[in-house]
Amino acid sequence: MNEESRLASLAEVRSRWSALERDWQSVVVGVTVVALVSLLDVHIPWAWSW
């Protein structure tokens, strides 16, 4: 494997890792919102029925 292809592979791995980190952060935020709404009966304006 030459140096250019190694750097390209490393960049691809970093890109995929960053995407996974964003996905997990989104999951944590979603779980937190659901927990607050259900456990603490917190009302979120966009969840109200009109």
Image (cartoon, helix red, strand yellow):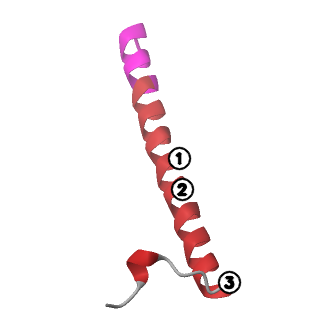
Front-lying residue, 42 or 7: 42
Three-letter code, disc 1: Glu
Q: Which residue is mark 2?
A: 24
Q: CA distance from mark 2 to mark 1?
A: 5 Å
Residue 38 horizontal side relative to residue 19, left or right:
right
The residue positioned 53% from the left and 47% from the top of the image is 21
Q: Position of residue 38 (x, y in %)?
A: 61, 86
Q: Residue at x 68, y 83 (%)?
A: 40
Please rate how many residues cluster around mark 3, counting C-alpha atoms within 10 Å: few if below 14, some from 14 to 19, many from 20.
few
In terms of secondary structure, where does tag 1 sit? Answer: helix
**Of tags 3 and 2, which is closer to the observer?**
3
Residue 45 screen position, x and y as percent: 43, 77
Tell me the crowding category of disc 2: few under 14, some 14 to 19, or many 20 or more residues within 10 angstroms, Cα based.
Answer: few
- Secondary structure, mark 2, is helix
What residue is rendered at 36% in x and 17% in y? 5
User: Which residue position is annotated with label 3?
Assistant: 40
Which amino acid type is shown beneath numbered disc 3?
Leu
- The amino acid on which the numbered mark 2 sits, given as a three-letter code, is Trp
Q: Residue furthest left?
A: 50
Q: Earlier in the sequence, mark 1 or mark 3?
A: 1
How far, Cα to Cα, is label 3 from label 2? Answer: 23 Å
Which residues are drawn in magenta?
1-10
- Alpha carbon distance from label 1 to label 3: 28 Å
| Marks 2,1: beta carbons within 8 A | yes
